């Protein structure tokens, strides 16, 4: 039986504890971006990581890849930016696997070569640069 998951992403936040990124269940996207202070806009350059957690804000705050990989991908003048879509388990884990399998962000290691779930359709909208709006993955 095929699975369908819809994700509505909010973002882009530059600071983890600014009150923007919820500390609830969901998928998060990590980007390299440049913030224009005069115009208060963000220019997204690259998607570098996709993750999931039951408490996204806490997970991002203490993530082991933040120093190891994420910050290492930033170019001069860039900062990390985050986007969030609310989703609970088991869909959260399936959505993360499907997104990683399809988009292969440079800082992810799991799900890059194998999708171990049933056929899944993912539809994404909102603040999710470099994510296809609709795609299907199969095992």
Image: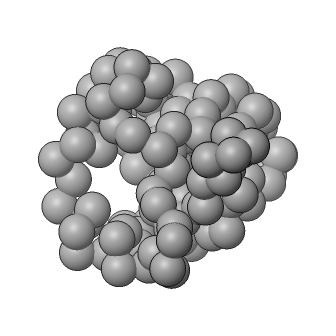
Residue 101, position as x, y percentages in the image: 57, 65
Front-lying residue, 127 or 113: 127
Is residue 54 shown above or below 41?
above
**Closer-to-camera residue (73/77):** 77
**Res. 60 image quadrant:** top left
Q: Is residue 50 above or below residue 25?
A: below
Which colour scheme appears in the figure? Answer: one colour
Q: Give me the residue at 34% from left, 37% from top.
A: 16
Q: Please, is residue 108 above or below residue 26 in the view? A: below
114 left or right, relative to 52: right
Occupied quadrant, residue 83: top right
Q: Position of residue 110 (x, y in %)?
A: 37, 67
Q: Nearer the viewer, residue 94 or 74?
A: 74
Work out which quarter of the rendered image holds the N terminus and state it. Answer: top right
User: Which corner quadrant holds the C terminus?
Assistant: bottom right
Q: Nearer the viewer, residue 52 or 101?
A: 52
Q: Is 36 left, or right, of 17 in this rendering?
A: right
Q: Residue at x 44, y 78 (%)?
A: 73
Q: Residue at x 46, y 75 (%)?
A: 74
Examine the rendering and report whether any part of residue 81 can be seen.
yes
Residue 138 visible? The answer is: no
């Amino acid at each position: 039986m095929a699975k369908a998951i819809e994700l509505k992403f909010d973002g882009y936040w530059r600071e983890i504890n600014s009150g923007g990124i919820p500390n609830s269940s969901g998928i998060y996207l990590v980007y390299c971006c440049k913030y224009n202070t005069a115009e208060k806009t963000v220019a997204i350059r690259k998607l570098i990581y996709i993750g999931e957690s039951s408490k996204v804000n806490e997970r991002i705050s203490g993530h082991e890849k933040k120093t190891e990989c994420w910050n290492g991908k930033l170019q001069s003048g860039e900062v990390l930016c985050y986007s969030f879509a609310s989703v609970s388990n088991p869909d959260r884990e399936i959505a993360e696997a499907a997104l990683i399998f399809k988009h292969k962000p440079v800082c992810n290691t799991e799900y890059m070569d194998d999708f171990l779930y049933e056929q899944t359709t993912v539809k994404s909208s909102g603040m999710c640069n470099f994510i296809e709006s609709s795609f299907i993955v199969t095992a």
